[in-house]
Each structure stands twice: as structure tokens, then as C-alpha cells.
Amino acid sequence: MKVDWKERKRFRRVWLRALRTTTEKQGRGKLGNAADGYCCLGLGCAVNNIPYASERGLLTAHQTFRLGLRPGAVNALATMNDAHGSSFSAIAAAITKNPKKFFIQEPTDAR
């Protein structure tokens, strides 16, 4: 599958904005939906129109790839959301503070 770096940057920007500003309820234990509340990962899919199953606990490999997340980042973000009870804004701050921990970086020759 070809990597669309522009799309990934747009996804990241839209997702971080949503984490900082959303009025959606925050859920735990599953990706979620508007009625029950979103996990931070489910919110990322929802605001970027990436199809997902709301009852799943984690993203699929395809969803992880589309968002440009490192594989280990999915578990780290789910733990922050579910086990630690971090708010959406705290999760956004953690991602912003250390984006290389969470996102695959664009190779310099791809720019």
C-alpha cells in the first residue's frame, strides 16, 4: 500500500484539533461512537471519516497505517485513554510533546 504523507499530515492535524476541542463524550474500553462516547482512537477515525467498528478495543492494522501511527502507539494511546483515564486534551498534549513516539515520520526523501 502506498503511503500518502499529505493525507497522514491532514489526519494528524484534524485529529489533534478534535482531541483539543471536542465536546463529544469520552468513552473507555472500545473505540466508541457519538452515543456512548469515543476512545481517543475512535475519535481519530470518526473525525477523519475512516471506517471502524465501534465495539472494537483497538484499531486494525489498516486503520493504524492510514492514521500514520506507530504500531506501539496504539496500545500506548489506548492505555492513556482507558487505564489512566487521561482526558482528550491531555492525550493531545502528550502527542504534541513527542510526536515521534506516536507517528511514523516522513522520510526526508519523500518531501
Image (tube, grey):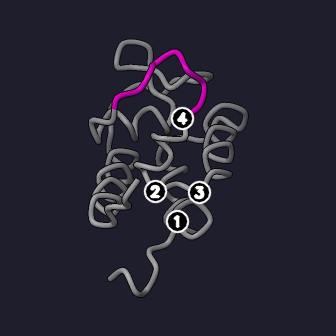
Give yes or no for contact between labels 3 and 1 (Cβ–Cβ under 8 Å).
yes
Spatial CA span between label 4 and label 3: 12 Å
Q: Quadrant of the C terminus?
A: bottom left
Q: Which mark is residue 70?
A: 3
Q: Nearer the viewer, residue 67 or 35?
A: 67
Which residue is tagged 2?
68
Give yes or no for contact between labels 4 and 3 (Cβ–Cβ under 8 Å).
no
* Amino acid tagged 2: Gly
Which residues, given as a range, are shown in magenta? Answer: 51-58
Q: Nearer the viewer, residue 109 or 71?
A: 109
Give yes or no for contact between labels 1 and 2 (Cβ–Cβ under 8 Å).
yes
Spatial CA span between label 2 and label 4: 12 Å
**Marked residue nearer the N-terminal end (3 or 1):** 3
Can you give x and y, in whole percent of width and height, for residue 32 in the image? 46, 21
Which residue is tagged 4?
59
Can you give x and y, in whole percent of width and height, for residue 108 in the image? 43, 86
* Amino acid tagged 1: Ile
Can you give x and y, in whole percent of width and height, for residue 34 in the image? 34, 19
* Amino acid tagged 4: Leu
* Amino acid tagged 3: Arg
Spatial CA span between label 1 and label 2: 6 Å
Q: Residues within 10 Å of mark 4 (few under 14, many from 20)?
A: many
The chief SS type of the magenta part is loop
**Marked residue nearer the N-terminal end (1 or 2):** 2
Q: Is residue 53 magenta?
A: yes
Residue that appears at 49% across and 38% down: 40
Spatial CA span between label 3 and label 1: 5 Å
Q: Residue furthest bottom?
A: 109
Which residue is tagged 1?
104
